[in-house]
């Protein structure tokens, strides 16, 4: 075959490897009526609750706010973004999303998902053709099995990881070129791309390259050649890391202040489950929703290739030493899927929160690679071997039935056994009798097998409708744009409705909500301390008070009109209740939202008392803590509270014991067959704002309603939260009902407080005396002037403290200090000052320098070698 014909054939093979998984999955998505094919969407779990909002942020970053590449005030109260982007968004394929704004973003997600399926198949085909493990159209069987393997289907929603399946075959091809030809360029380039694309998956692939080197060493002649290959591998890997340093160094630092703080320090030498359960993953369609939070690794690659993987270890044409190493590597993988220390190693020392065994895509790749080596065109299985495989398969499927795994049905096991029988029948045929028909049968069997497995698995998953996403997003975007036209300045926005905690990234505004793996722990700690729902990796500003609104600079508020209901559908899910916003002046209105102006909001920086430097740790009472912060800033005694406890006017007990004290009491049902309620009534003696505190234990054991209506609140929280009960309701009774959901309930921290409006207004007036008047603001730079009055020797900010912030006052650099464990503040003298805040990711310059040096040295070395 001449060179031109060879290129043409390879082009056809690569194109087919791309198109087959795209057509298969595209047909399935059309059948499920996913947008743009119908009223459903691909959004589910994290893709619908997190990634889709990051994609909207990515579009705004590219098109409008390039500075938010490094920092964003849409991330909670503000946070670094380089580490976040390195985990979620550095895939170059995300540029496709630029063509899909707003509610059409779901169609972009569809296109991006199909593209990744296709590119994964193409990359695998490229590796098989280049290594000559397979040739011709039969390559499609192996590339399709890889593109639609069990991990890819189960993690279809985790788009941020899928580039790893595209880049992995290219890295392995480069590694083979390095080991056998001494050519490092391909390996260095693709490994560097992987490290920049997603450092998390790159870590797993780096571990795998060590195993690949061990697998290839027996094929090298002599120990000198092996030592030379190992040295070249080590130097090339370091070169890749050096080239990627511009993102790796800032990201590693960011991880030490966020995700890295959760690394496990206590490792138990134990098995996480019975290893025999992994047999269930050898059945097509072995996945359901319950496998997402916890389960076994998803490794299915089709029955023919599973058989081929086993046959590799009996392939006499492969040196026995290489087969032995491959066997040890396979055992290592299997142990990694159930033995805790190895599991933690692959996940960089942290147990996954949902989506266990995230590295199992590498094992799927490994299986396809071994099967491609074993199932050569001339291979023909003998009857004794086929009979042994059939008997073993029957025993395996019998055992999976006895395990009673929720994601497996009898029909799935029978279908799997059917594919075993058909695969064995094809392997018993001599290919030379009809090569084209033989290869067609192999392709057909594998495509039908992995296609059936994919469709079966995905049919068990529920998805967000296009209307649920599109209508909400359209209303949020409209309200956000309306506010920006009214006020193009720098401010935060609070709201009482929520689709996801990353709404600020979706709507392109500043707030205090966020859900992401790289959220700094200080933020949820502070938000939880002031009565907001918070946890590891998320915060949600739903339960604010007039004090917290003012302190954190919520200049505008948004509420849902018509209770968020349109045409009998809840298109704006409610997450909070704020009657104390009702008196605020309205500044905008859309079909489904109302925006109001909060004149009490403080700017991002303002003059305050130095007492804030002496304020200790948070109290267990969120309203007391809010009061202490505000009073310390205003220079008033912190023992003069802004909130006062109010007594309930009356209490009614239904089917529970009576008690003189409500908070801290555990109430139990007297008759287990009847409903049980505790009804607390109080009559506001003033028109001030009233707030209810509620411990996290209550929500799990009782439903809560006010005046016979359920509370609208976000119900995932671990700290005591604050709920606004009344405002301007003097003399009007308010009844709170706790209905037991279980046999007992502990009314933890259940108390009502009144805001002392006069005291709050007096402290607020003091803090409003010295605002920072912003002259210029971007995500990474804030510049303005401030006139500090006497008695105020501190410039307080509500910018979360971080090493990357650099502050200048009147042109002189000032070292900011951290107050209340969260925010930046700096000493300042009375008078008028020019203040400038600049953010630069730590180690960015060093990383850029290392990248330039590494790239230059690598290019020089490769050219010299040539």
Image (cartoon, grey):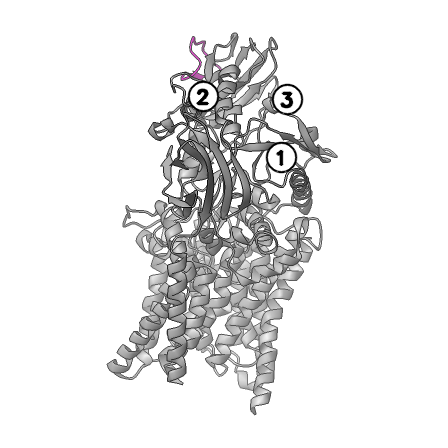
Q: Is residue 165 left or right of residue 57?
A: left
- Residue 28 is left or right of residue 704, and the answer is right
Image x and y of residue 755, in percent: 51, 17
Q: Which mark is residue 583?
A: 3
First reached walking from the N terminus: tag 1 or tag 3: 1
Residue nearest the observer in this picture, 619 or 450: 619
Q: Residue at x 61, y 10 (%)?
A: 732
For residue 745, the mark is 2
Whether residue 144 is visible, yes or no, is no
Evaluate whether residue 564 shows in this view: yes
642 and 468: which is toward the camera: 642
Give the percent coordinates (x, y) of residue 683.
56, 9
- Distance in Å between CA atoms under marks 2 and 1: 27 Å
Q: Is residue 671 magenta?
A: yes
State which region is magenta: 657-673
Pointer 2: residues within 10 angstroms few (<14), some, or many (20+)?
A: many
Contact (Cβ within 8 Å) of mark 1 with mark 3: no
């Amino acid at each position: 075959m001449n060179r031109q014909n060879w290129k043409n054939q390879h082009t056809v093979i690569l194109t087919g490897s791309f198109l087959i998984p795209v057509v298969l999955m595209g047909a399935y998505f059309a059948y499920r009526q996913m947008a743009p094919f119908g009223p459903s969407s691909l959004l589910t779990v994290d893709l619908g609750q997190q990634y889709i909002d990051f994609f909207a942020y990515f579009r705004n970053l590219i098109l409008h706010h390039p500075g938010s590449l490094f920092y964003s005030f849409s991330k909670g109260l503000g946070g670094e973004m380089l580490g976040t982007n390195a985990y979620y968004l550095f895939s170059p394929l995300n540029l496709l999303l630029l063509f899909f704004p707003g509610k059409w973003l779901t169609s972009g997600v569809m296109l991006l998902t199909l593209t990744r399926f296709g590119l994964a198949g193409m990359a695998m085909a490229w590796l098989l053709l280049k290594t000559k493990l397979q040739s011709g159209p039969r390559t499609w069987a192996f590339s399709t099995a890889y593109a639609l393997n069990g991990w890819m289907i189960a993690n279809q929603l985790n788009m941020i990881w899928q580039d790893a399946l595209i880049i992995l075959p290219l890295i392995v091809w480069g590694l083979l070129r390095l080991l056998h030809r001494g050519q490092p360029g391909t390996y260095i380039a693709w490994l560097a791309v992987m490290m920049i694309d997603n450092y998390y998956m790159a870590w797993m692939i780096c571990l795998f390259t060590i195993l690949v080197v061990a697998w290839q060493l027996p094929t090298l002649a002599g120990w000198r050649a092996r030592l030379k290959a190992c040295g070249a591998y080590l130097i090339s890997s370091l070169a890749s890391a050096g080239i990627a340093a511009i993102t790796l160094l800032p990201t590693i630092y960011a991880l030490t202040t966020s995700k890295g703080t959760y690394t496990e320090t206590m490792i138990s030498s134990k098995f996480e489950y019975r290893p025999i359960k992994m047999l269930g993953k050898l059945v097509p369609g072995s996945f359901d929703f319950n496998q997402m939070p916890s389960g076994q690794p998803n490794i299915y690659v089709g029955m023919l290739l599973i058989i081929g993987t086993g046959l590799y270890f009996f392939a006499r044409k492969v040196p026995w030493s290489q087969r032995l190493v491959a066997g040890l590597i396979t055992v290592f993988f299997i142990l990694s899927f159930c033995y805790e220390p190895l599991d933690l190693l692959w996940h960089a020392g942290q147990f996954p929160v949902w989506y266990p065994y995230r590295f199992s895509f590498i094992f799927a790749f490994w299986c396809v690679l071994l099967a491609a080596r074993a199932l050569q065109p001339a291979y023909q299985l003998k009857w004794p071997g086929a009979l042994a495989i059939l008997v073993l398969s029957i025993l395996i499927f019998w055992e999976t039935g006895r395990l009673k795994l929720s994601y497996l049905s009898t029909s799935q096991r029978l279908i799997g056994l059917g594919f075993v029988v058909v695969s064995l029948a094809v392997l018993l045929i001599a290919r030379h009798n009809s090569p084209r028909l033989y290869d067609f049968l192999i392709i057909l069997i594998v495509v039908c097998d992995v296609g059936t497995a994919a469709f079966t698995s995905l049919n068990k998953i529920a998805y967000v409708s296009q209307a649920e996403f599109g209508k909400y997003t359209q209303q949020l975007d409209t309200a956000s744009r309306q506010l920006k036209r009214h006020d193009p300045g720098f401010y935060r926005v609070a709201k009482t409705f929520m689709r996801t905690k990353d709404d600020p990234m979706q709507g392109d505004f500043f707030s205090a909500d966020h859900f992401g793996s790289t959220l700094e722990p200080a933020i949820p700690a502070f938000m939880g301390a002031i009565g907001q729902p918070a946890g590891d990796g998320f915060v949600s500003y739903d339960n604010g008070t007039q004090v917290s609104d003012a302190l954190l600079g919520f200049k505008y508020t948004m509420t849902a009109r018509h209770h968020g209901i349109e045409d009998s559908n809840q298109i704006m899910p409610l997450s909070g209740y704020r009657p104390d916003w009702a008196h605020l002046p309205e500044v905008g209105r859309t079909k489904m939202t109302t925006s109001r102006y909060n004149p009490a909001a403080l700017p991002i920086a303002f003059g305050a008392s130095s007492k804030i430097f002496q304020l200790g740790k948070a109290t267990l009472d969120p309203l007391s803590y809010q009061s202490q912060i505000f009073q310390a800033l205003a220079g008033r005694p912190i023992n003069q509270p802004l909130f006062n406890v109010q007594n309930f006017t009356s209490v009614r007990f239904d089917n529970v014991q009576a008690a003189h004290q409500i908070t801290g009491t555990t109430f139990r049902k007297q008759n287990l067959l009847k409903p049980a309620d505790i009804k607390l009534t109080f009559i506001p003696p003033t028109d001030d704002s009233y707030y209810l505190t509620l411990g996290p234990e209550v929500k799990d054991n009782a439903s809560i309603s006010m005046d016979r209506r359920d509370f609208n609140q976000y119900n995932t929280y671990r700290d005591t939260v604050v709920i606004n009960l009344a405002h301007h309701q003097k003399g009007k009774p308010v009844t709170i009902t706790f209905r037991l959901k279980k046999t007992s309930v502990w009314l933890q921290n259940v108390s009502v407080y009144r805001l002392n409006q006069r005291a709050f207004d007096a402290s607020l007036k003091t803090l409003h005396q010295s605002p920072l008047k912003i002259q210029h603001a971007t995500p990474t730079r804030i510049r303005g002037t401030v006139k500090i009055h006497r008695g105020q020797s501190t410039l307080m900010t509500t910018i979360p403290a971080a090493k990357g912030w650099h502050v200048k006052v009147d042109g002189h650099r000032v070292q900011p200090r951290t107050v209340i464990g969260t925010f930046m503040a700096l000493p300042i003298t009375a008078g008028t000052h020019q203040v400038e805040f600049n953010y630069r990711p730590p180690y960015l310059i060093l990383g850029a320098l290392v990248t330039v040096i590494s790239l230059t040295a690598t290019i020089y070395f490769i050219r010299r070698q040539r």
